[in-house]
Image (cartoon, rainbow, N blue to C red):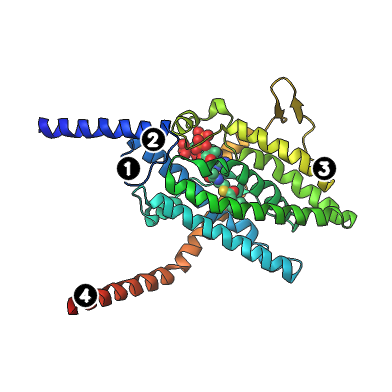
Amino acid sequence: MTDRHDAQAEHDAEGQAQFDALIDADSRIEPRDWMPAAYRKTLLRQISQHAHSEIIGMQPEANWITRAPSLKRKSILIAKVQDEAGHGLYLYSAAETLGQSRHEMMDDLLAGKAKYSSIFNYPARTWADMGAIGWLVDGAAICNQVPLCRASYGPYGRAMVRICKEESFHQRQGFEILLELANGTPEQRQMAQDAVNRWYAPALMMFGPPDDESPNSQQSMAWKIKRFSNDELRQRFLGMMVEQVTVLGLELPDKDIRFNEETGKWEHGPLDWAEFWRVIGGSGPCNAQRMERRRDAHAEGAWVREAAAAYAAKQAARAAEKEKAA
Ligand code: FAQ
């Protein structure tokens, strides 16, 4: 018993040393490598939350597919929503390499145990919201996710490369929707400004709580999962939006935005963090609706999962028979 215990302790110490060396060298941890249990848990938490966000995030835009103003807009929006489904799948696959099945992750989401991004609990009221979501929400997503391409866990970083390429297209399509509306009739312009007004603060809050209220940031940065803090990325995003909004000819609904010459950082006005925690806690404007729709979609898709499982079982049985005969 003691020998086994000693051998395990020695194995863990060696594993930890190798892990530390890989992190120090800015190298990658791969699924079969030894990793601390807390590193695995943090990754599973972040990657599964991220996957759930992509899947729930399909809803505000899917809501507008049937009402898109032209065939061209409709096909672009369908493609974008499909991309989000694909992002969810890459991310569930990356998370599965850490030892939890997609099935279990989905059960946690449906049971209300797993989080997804706060931003997807806000309603998409008009067509201009498709522009604001693309420009602000996908813009914030890219800003947060480009550094994740260098995340220390290999499968996560690699999934993020493709996701970021697609998010970049998403942001441009959102910007272009707003640009067209901003240069349209006074009503269209007002609709664009109204959408920007409603999505601005929730998009800033997507980056997570302020650094001094972010319990996970420090350790995640030490493990090189996160490369920048929540506030650093929020400030970087704000700087990008300040420039781009001038091209749109619209305004960000924040009188307090300023560039602080001393710190070299962009600053914004106060954000309603009580609202943020309320939304995360399940009491945002659309939480109940989003979860109900997800549960319905899951139930409606049961026959597809059953058919796929039956097909896979048939294939496996056929392959086994072939092997036996050979
Ligand atoms: N919403 O200690 P921290 C997209 C939670 S994808 C909900 O700072 P961390 C694409 C956090 O989980 C958008 N919960 O946490 C798209 C933690 O709770 P826990 C999703 C949030 O992990 C576009 C607690 O608060 N992106 O938009 C949020 O170090 C258009 C304390 O926070 C990602 O998931 C929030 N906004 O930093 C799709 C990116 N913020 O777990 C469709 C990857 C914080 O301890 C249409 N994730 N919390 O119970 C990350 O970069 C990080 O996880 C952060 C949070 C930065 C989100």
The answer to which of marks 2 and 3 sits earlier in the sequence is 2
Label 3 CA crowd tier, 10 Å (few <14, some 14–19, many 20+): few
Q: Nearer the viewer, mark 2 or mark 4?
A: 2
Q: How many marks?
A: 4
What residue did someone put label 1 on?
A: 33
The answer to which of marks 3 and 1 sits earlier in the sequence is 1
What residue did someone put label 2 on?
A: 22
Whole-number angstrom distance, CA of label 2 to CA of label 4: 41 Å
The answer to which of marks 1 and 4 sits earlier in the sequence is 1
Name which quarter of the figure residue 243 lies in.
top right
Looking at the image, do the residues carrying marks 2 and 3 touch, with CB atoms under 8 Å apart? Answer: no
Q: At label 1, which amino acid type do we have? A: Asp
Name which quarter of the figure residue 252 lies in.
top right
Q: At label 3, which amino acid type do we have? A: Thr
At x 68% / y 54%, what residue is drawn?
124
At x 36% / y 31%, what residue is drawn?
20
The percent coordinates of residue 291 (x first, y second) are 52, 54
Q: Is mark 3 within 8 Å of ligand 1?
A: no
Q: At label 2, which amino acid type do we have? A: Leu
Whole-number angstrom distance, CA of label 3 to CA of label 1: 48 Å
- Residue 102 lies left or right of residue 126; in this view the side is left
Q: Residue furthest top?
A: 262
Label 3 SS: helix
The answer to which of marks 2 and 4 sits earlier in the sequence is 2
Label 4 CA crowd tier, 10 Å (few <14, some 14–19, many 20+): few
Label 1 SS: loop
Q: At label 4, which amino acid type do we have? A: Glu
Q: Nearer the viewer, mark 3 or mark 1?
A: 1
- Residue 173 lies left or right of residue 150; in this view the side is right
What residue did someone put label 4 on?
A: 323
Q: Which mark is residue 246?
A: 3
